Amino acid sequence: MINFFWKKFSSLTVHELYEILSLRAEVFVVEQKCIYQDADGKDEIAIHLIGIENNKLVAYLRLFPPTKNNPIIFGRVIVAKSARQKSYGKKLIEEMLNFCDKHFPQTKIKCSAQLYLKKFYEEFGFKIVGDSYLEDDIPHIEMQK
């Protein structure tokens, strides 16, 4: 069973941060073959949602609270390959939406999604806003709820 925890960057343990960066590199850099600098200087201002199963990080996303000119933005959505057949991606997004409803009611939520995940996000009420584009040679779309 997965358990979710919300943490600010300053609350992450060294071990948790290592697991987050390792999982992101494992999937985004190695599995998806995207050579890029993952540590982008934004983790420090994000709120991190970590999904733990058997003391191991298996699901993750980061969320940026709304600002005066921007909606809530989330990204780096990831589920470990070993945990992908357990609906943890859906549970991760449900947890994020519940958090947003509680802390930022009636605020728009935006993400940049890989195009193949369009229907996945549409199940949660997200709609495409704008044209598709390439990021690291992977088709992406902006989506908003």
Image (cartoon, rainbow, N blue to C red):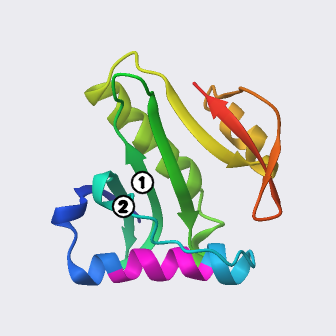
Q: Is residue 72 visible?
A: yes
Q: Is residue 55 visible?
A: no
Please name the residue that numbered disc 1 is placed on. 62
Dominant SS of magenta comes to helix
Q: What secondary structure is found at the residue carrying circle 1?
A: strand
Residue at the left extreme, as displayed: 11
Query: Of residues 81 and 12, which is closer to you in this image?
Result: 12
Q: Quadrant of residue 85?
A: bottom right
Whether 137 is drawn above or below 53: the answer is above
**Foreground disc of the pair 1, 2:** 2
Q: Which residues are magenta?
A: 18-26
Q: Is residue 134 left or right of residue 85?
A: right
Residue that appears at 24% across and 62% down:
9
**Disc 2 marks which amino acid?**
Asp
Q: What secondary structure is found at the residue carrying circle 2?
A: helix
Residue that appears at 56% across and 63% down:
78
